[in-house]
Amino acid sequence: MINITDSAAERLKEMLAQQETPNMFLRLGVTPGGCTGFSYAMGFDDQESDQDIYMDIQEMKVVMEKDSLRYLDGLEIDFEESGMSGGFTIHNPNAVATCGCGSSFRTRDDAGVPSPEQC
């Protein structure tokens, strides 16, 4: 199960509404790399695969590859305003270590493929 807070959903829906391509959805994923072993991937997509799983979260279509679910199950995405800026934050209960910038992680069972030059 993935949780997207109300503030993150509001911001994501605004961003989706600005997309010029119809039928866009939120794609979440995990790729090898980053300082700690795995990097998060989050963006909009309109291409689907037979390796994808689909969820309806906060009235949005959310898609991820089946292989990513074991790393992202329980994930919470939030959006926080901070002064004149704001950004998405990710809380992943599967992560046992994260890098200083918060964009990469590793799990207890899988260290991934760290690449420190990406941080």
Image: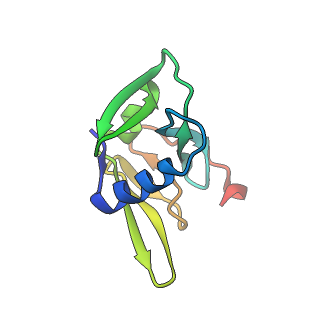
- Which is nearer the eye, 76 or 100? 76
Residue 54, x across and y down, in percent: 37, 27
Rendered position, 105 above or below 85: above
The answer to whether residue 75 is left or right of residue 21 is: left
Rendered position, 76 above or below 79: above
Farthest right residue? Answer: 117
Rendered residue at 32%/39% (across/down) = 73
Farthest bottom residue? Answer: 83
Rendered residue at 45%/23% (across/down) = 52
Quarter containing the N terminus = top left
Quarter containing the C terminus = bottom right
Residue 74, x across and y down, in percent: 28, 44
Residue 2, x across and y down, in percent: 30, 43
Rendered residue at 40%/39% (across/down) = 71
- Which is nearer the eye, 3 or 72? 3
Residue 117, x across and y down, in percent: 73, 57
